[in-house]
Image (tube, rainbow, N blue to C red):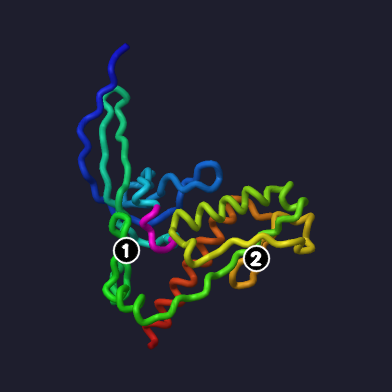
């Protein structure tokens, strides 16, 4: 059999609008969709890129992706993998985050850690009654936990199993930290809810800090 040869990797930098993630098994973040001037690009994420994100990305947000690509001569395609994702801001603020490798740097991050007391962890409630579990409650809980781990939010959020939420036929049921109740939750929806909630919290934090 012929041997498949792959060229030495070379780096790339590409900018565009965040168009979403591609999940594996319904909740594992594996690839990123990036809308560029030449069309939508699908980029595989390295472990470093996945775990380094300090917050959830918002759809349409401008980002810069850095990574490596290799060309497979026999199959004639590029293998592309990102190792760094950085949010691009036209009007940078002093507390904006720069995502680099597995560390998050910020101009005022060290100061904020010293001066601000630790916040109580938020809680996501997941119904653990048998009817909800039969409808996929365990998979939803696993998806939530996986998403929190991917974005290193486990020190800020805890998932708590509860008794019946009185909507068994509409399960799985979860309650987000802002007390909103969601029914018929799928693993994909659970990931989206986490992203939406913590993006809103991030926006509120930036707003309040700018007002002060």
Task: Inspect this view and state whether residue 153 appears.
Answer: yes
Q: Residue at x 64, y 72 (%)?
A: 179
Nearer to us in this view, 146 or 27? 146
Q: Residue at x 75, y 63 (%)?
A: 165
| First in sequence: mark 2 vs mark 1 | 1
Residue 43: percent from left, percent from top = 36, 44
Q: Is residue 144 magenta?
A: no
Residue 125: percent from left, percent from top = 64, 63
Callout 1 crowding tier (Cα within 10 Å): few <14, some 14–19, many ≥20: few
Q: Secondary structure at mark 2?
A: strand
Outermost bottom residue: 212
Q: Which residue is mark 1?
A: 104
Image position of 55 (left or right of 184): left
Image position of 42 (left or right of 174): left
Residue 209 location, quadrant = bottom left
Q: Up-down: is 107 above or below 86?
A: below
The region drawn magenta spans: 51-56
Proximity of marks 2 and 1: CB atoms separated by less than 8 Å: no
Q: Up-down: is 167 above or below 78?
A: below
Task: Inspect this view and state whether residue 41 appears.
Answer: no
- Number of on-image labels: 2
Residue 191: percent from left, percent from top = 54, 55
Q: Which residue is mark 2?
A: 175
Nearer to us in this view, 46 or 4? 46
Image position of 171 (left or right of 102): right
Q: Main secondary structure of the magenta part?
A: loop
Q: Residue at x 33, y 59 (%)?
A: 63
Residue 82: percent from left, percent from top = 32, 47
Residue 18 location, quadrant = bottom left
Q: Up-down: is 159 above or below 20?
A: below
């Amino acid at each position: 059999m012929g041997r498949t040869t792959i060229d030495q990797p070379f780096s790339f930098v590409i900018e565009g609008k965040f168009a979403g993630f591609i999940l594996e098994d319904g909740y594992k973040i594996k690839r990123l969709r990036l809308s560029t001037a030449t069309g939508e690009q699908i980029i595989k994420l390295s472990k470093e890129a996945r775990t380094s994100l300090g917050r959830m990305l918002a759809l349409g947000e401008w980002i810069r992706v850095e990574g490596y690509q290799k060309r497979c001569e026999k199959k004639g395609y590029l293998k592309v993998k990102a190792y760094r994702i950085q949010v691009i801001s036209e009007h940078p603020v002093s507390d904006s985050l720069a995502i680099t490798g597995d560390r998050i740097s910020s101009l005022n991050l060290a100061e904020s850690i010293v001066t601000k007391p630790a916040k109580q962890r938020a809680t996501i409630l997941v119904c653990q009654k048998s009817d909800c579990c039969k409808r996929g409650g365990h998979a939803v809980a696993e998806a939530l936990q996986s998403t929190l781990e991917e974005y290193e939010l486990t020190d800020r959020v805890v998932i708590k199993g509860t008794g019946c939420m009185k909507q068994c036929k509409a399960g799985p049921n979860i309650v987000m930290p802002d007390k909103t109740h969601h029914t018929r939750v799928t693993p994909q929806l659970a990931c989206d809810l986490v992203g939406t909630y913590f993006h809103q919290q991030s926006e509120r934090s930036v707003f309040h800090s700018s007002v002060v």
